[in-house]
Image (cartoon, rainbow, N blue to C red):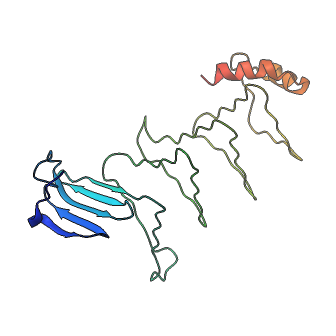
Amino acid sequence: MAEFSADYTIFNNSHAFMHTGPIANNVEDIQNDVYFATSGKCHAHWNKNGTKTEFVEGRWDEVSGFSISQEQDIARTIVAKNGDIHINADYGDIYLKARNIYIETKGDKPNGCFLVTANGHMILTGADEVKLASGTNLCLIGKSKINLVGAQILTSGDFKDSGSLSSVGFISKFIAGDFESLIKGMLQSCK
């Protein structure tokens, strides 16, 4: 059983325990600065190397911004001066809900990418307009099929020879519904 250093224990009762410095005299020194634990199995640990670990047994809610009067004022900021930020919900879902959501990648080449991967459906829906724009090339690949549905389908620009995607061949295959060869050509041109 651990022998707690009483001089460093701030409180220790049936509700909570708070301790500074080494946790105990007869156990390995884990470089503890502050350790806090509750009877509900929640605890927080601040380490001498500057790290903090927090465990919450149940639900964790944070609410802020009650006294903010202006619409654009910041109510909460999470900043990592260096390193990554990971949000994991391996056995749950992640919901982001806001009036607007802005995502920006600002890294220089080869960074600055926005990558999204889904094992199932990926649905992008806009009540007004959805735009896809690229500074150089736009690649659209459907290995099985591509459906273009609309009251009008408008194209702008020239069809140019891109391996198997020659303008005449592309249009004739598109009109004839020969999407298999079109997809093969797209796969080659999108490499």
Give the side of residue 4 with respect to residue 117, left or right: left
Looking at the image, which residue is at 80% across and 23% down? 170
Give the side of residue 106 with respect to residue 8, left or right: right
- How many labels, in total? 0
The residue nearer to you, when weighing 146 against 153, is 146
Give the side of residue 64 with respect to residue 183, left or right: left
**Residue 184 drawn at (x, y percent):** 72, 18
Looking at the image, which residue is at 75% across and 28% down? 159
The residue nearer to you, when weighing 16 against 189, is 16
Relative vertical location of residue 154 with respect to residue 77 in this rendering, above or below: above
**Residue 91 drawn at (x, y percent):** 55, 46
Looking at the image, which residue is at 80% across and 20% down? 180
The residue nearer to you, when weighing 182 against 25, is 25
Relative vertical location of residue 183 with respect to residue 97 in this rendering, above or below: above
**Residue 145 drawn at (x, y percent):** 79, 28
**Residue 25 drawn at (x, y percent):** 10, 52
The residue nearer to you, when weighing 34 against 136, is 34
